[in-house]
């Protein structure tokens, strides 16, 4: 019954339509023909959309933004001016020591410490994170305890403890536990040099923090990903490295680079072991020459250089891992610059293409 | 459409589920479920949410371990091995091997977002079946073509619509040449206008000789493709039969009351 009604309605519908549509079509045609002043033939005239395409777009004005920019620019200028003109910064001394052999040697030691403890710390952290996520209660609690201890003691104390390990344990030996069998034995003080104590302290501390960062990254990956991979028969190791870790990296990287940058400056703490990295070297020099501030500035500038280089790496590594996570990859600064010049050279007054 | 993959009258893919039980904590979600799906058959499982449909599906490829009962595929136990008079749980490696014979398509697609459509499809054949990369890519393109997405092979999942993503997921499941395909509400996460493009692909598969077990809320689709419709409620199979029988003439009051709620809008358009 209802279907019959619909057929009737459908067959009736087309008839009233053409006459209703005809007049507007006619006026539109005559309007575009040129005689625009013609009187409308029928009273209910449909509104005709006005054409704005020939108008020029004027961007909104933001006067306070300009005031703010001017104030900040003035401040920046003042700081730069005082840095350049205050003779007590002793830029000559800074320049003299910046590339001095001893400072460069210290810098190399700093980079070495950062690289070694950074890599070892993150490898150990990765293992600790996997332990923490495993099904074994023992592995979980060992991993938890590790992070707990190393995160709750000051790095300075850890460092001194490692360096003085010889006081606690005179000899370190490898053998079968609870028997007298020893494969080798060595004096602790010869094994734990300043360098070893520094690497040990920084690595273990770093591992405790990076374990949490990596664990957080792994947890941020949707459980469905693991399920899908398991359902496809992809082996466990491959699941971690090919499916989970690349996705976890997006969450891991920003915090991990924070940690590495922290580590670069954190290495300065090994001055307590009288280990001649950048900071200790600079201290030795200013104790001799009494040019304290310029030499601290030398160290600072180097730390800034290292951090800047790391930031560039961070940008490109993050961009690499954002593949697939964003619809289109963000432009690199170089591409942005090219685009800026291309668009601004071609169409000077239009903001949006 | 030119189906070079159609198996000759299916001889593989017999699924026998016997007395399967499964609990999550104190809640028993499967209370002794038994079901047989013939090789090349199409079983559609329907029922209210929380009735255990998805869980049953997930026990078939051992994503969920059963607490009681057993499941065999072509006579081979899933997840266990008979040694003497005992059932030994299989090791991870062997379970993974069994899973390559059972494809699964998820409600939320679960495509790997950092891999392109083609990489998604070609990943498992290489690492789980040891095929060459070139071979897997060639086959991957064939399968993407089959689901109508050959030209999007290099797109990342987030650059695809929901329907396209699900079609890639189906191609990914097909890449292992499974005997059995499991569909866990494949259209539930899709916008209404995208549902049909996915159902059409599944419809085409229904004639290919692969055994299909489908959990869905699309009753019209179930009527079209199913050999057997299974109605589940509260962890049990209440009723099963041909689509005609079960939709037009349900025997059990629970089946009748469920269909009276879901069929009305679907069939009175």
Image (cartoon, rainbow, N blue to C red):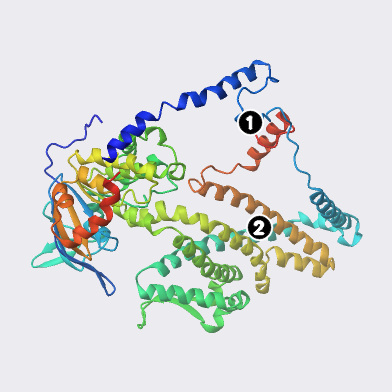
The quarter of the displayed image where residue A156 is located: bottom right
Residue B160 position by quadrant: top left
Report which residue position mark 2 lands on. A108
Spot occupied by residue A215 in the image (x, y as percentages of width and height): 47, 64
Q: Residue furthest left?
A: B84
Q: Are marks 1 and 2 on the same chain?
A: yes
Mark whose residue sits in front, 1 or 2? 1
Circle 2 chain: A
Q: Quadrant of the N terminus of chain A?
A: top left
- Percent position of residue B265, x then y: 30, 50
The numbered mark 1 sits on a residue in which chain? A
Q: Position of residue B210 (x, y in %)?
A: 19, 43
- Residue on which the image places disc 1: A49
Asked if residue B136 can be seen in this view, the reply is: yes
SS assignment at label 2 = helix
A334 left or right of A221?
right
Q: As drawn, is B64 to the left or to the right of A25?
A: left
Q: In this orientation, does residue B216 appear?
A: no
Q: Residues within 10 Å of mark 1 (few under 14, many from 20)?
A: few
Q: Position of residue A299 (x, y in %)?
A: 74, 61
Quarter occupied by residue A185: bottom left
Marks 1/2: CA distance?
A: 71 Å
Comparing A259 with A118, the one in front is: A259
First in residue order: circle 1 vs circle 2: 1
């Amino acid at each position: 019954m209802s279907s019959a009604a619909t057929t009737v309605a459908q067959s009736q519908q087309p008839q009233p339509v053409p006459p209703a549509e005809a007049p507007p079509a006619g006026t539109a045609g005559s309007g575009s023909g040129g005689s625009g002043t013609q009187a409308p033939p029928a009273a209910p005239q449909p509104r005709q959309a006005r054409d704005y395409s020939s108008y020029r777009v004027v961007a909104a004005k933001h006067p306070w933004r300009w005031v703010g920019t001017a104030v900040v620019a003035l401040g920046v200028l003042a700081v730069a001016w005082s840095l350049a003109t205050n003779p007590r910064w002793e830029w000559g001394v800074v320049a003299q020591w910046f590339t001095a052999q001893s400072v460069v040697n210290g810098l190399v030691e700093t980079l070495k410490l950062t690289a070694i403890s950074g890599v070892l710390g993150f490898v150990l952290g990765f293992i600790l994170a996997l332990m923490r996520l495993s099904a074994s209660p023992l592995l979980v609690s060992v991993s938890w305890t590790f992070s707990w201890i190393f995160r709750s003691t000051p790095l300075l104390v850890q460092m001194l403890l490692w360096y003085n390990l010889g006081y606690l344990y005179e000899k370190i030996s490898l053998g079968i536990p609870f028997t007298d069998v020893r494969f080798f034995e060595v004096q602790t003080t010869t094994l734990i040099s300043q360098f070893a104590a520094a690497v040990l302290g920084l690595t273990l501390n770093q591992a405790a923090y990076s374990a949490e960062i990596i664990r957080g990254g792994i947890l941020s990956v949707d459980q469905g990903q693991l399920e899908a991979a398991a359902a496809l028969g992809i082996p466990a190791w491959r699941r971690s490295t090919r499916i989970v870790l690349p996705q976890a990296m997006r969450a891991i990287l920003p915090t991990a680079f924070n940690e590495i940058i922290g580590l670069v400056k954190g290495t300065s703490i090994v001055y307590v072991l009288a280990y001649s990295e950048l900071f200790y070297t600079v201290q030795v020099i200013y104790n001799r020459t009494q040019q304290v501030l310029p030499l601290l500035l030398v160290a600072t500038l180097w730390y800034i250089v290292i951090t800047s280089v790391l930031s560039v790496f961070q940008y490109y590594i993050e961009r690499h891992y954002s593949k697939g996570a964003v619809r289109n990859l963000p432009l690199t600064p170089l591409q942005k610059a090219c685009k800026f010049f291309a668009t601004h050279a071609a169409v000077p007054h239009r903001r949006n293409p | 459409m030119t189906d070079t993959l159609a198996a000759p009258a299916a001889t593989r893919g017999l699924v026998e589920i016997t007395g399967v039980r499964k609990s999550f904590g104190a809640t028993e979600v499967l209370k002794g479920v038994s079901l047989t799906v013939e090789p090349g058959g199409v079983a559609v499982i329907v029922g209210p949410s929380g009735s255990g449909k998805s869980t049953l599906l997930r026990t078939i490829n051992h994503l969920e371990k059963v607490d009681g009962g057993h499941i065999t595929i072509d006579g081979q136990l899933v997840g266990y091995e008979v040694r003497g008079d005992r059932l030994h749980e299989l090791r991870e490696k062997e379970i993974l091997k069994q899973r390559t014979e059972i494809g699964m398509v998820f409600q939320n697609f679960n495509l790997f977002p950092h891999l392109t459509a083609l990489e998604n499809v070609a990943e498992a054949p290489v690492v789980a079946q040891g095929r060459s990369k070139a071979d897997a890519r060639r086959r991957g393109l064939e399968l993407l073509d089959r689901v109508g997405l050959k030209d999007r092979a290099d797109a990342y999942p987030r650059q695809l619509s929901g329907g396209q993503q699900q079609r890639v997921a189906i191609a990914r499941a097909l890449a292992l040449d499974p005997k059995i395909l499991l569909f866990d509400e494949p259209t539930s996460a899709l916008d209404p206008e995208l549902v049909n493009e996915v159902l059409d692909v599944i419809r085409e598969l229904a004639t290919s000789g692969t055994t299909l077990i489908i959990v869905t809320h699309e009753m019209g689709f179930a009527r079209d493709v199913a050999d057997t419709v299974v109605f589940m409620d509260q962890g049990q199979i209440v009723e099963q039969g041909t689509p005609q029988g079960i939709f037009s003439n349900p025997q059990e009051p629970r089946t009748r009351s469920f269909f009276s709620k879901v069929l009305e809008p679907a069939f009175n358009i």
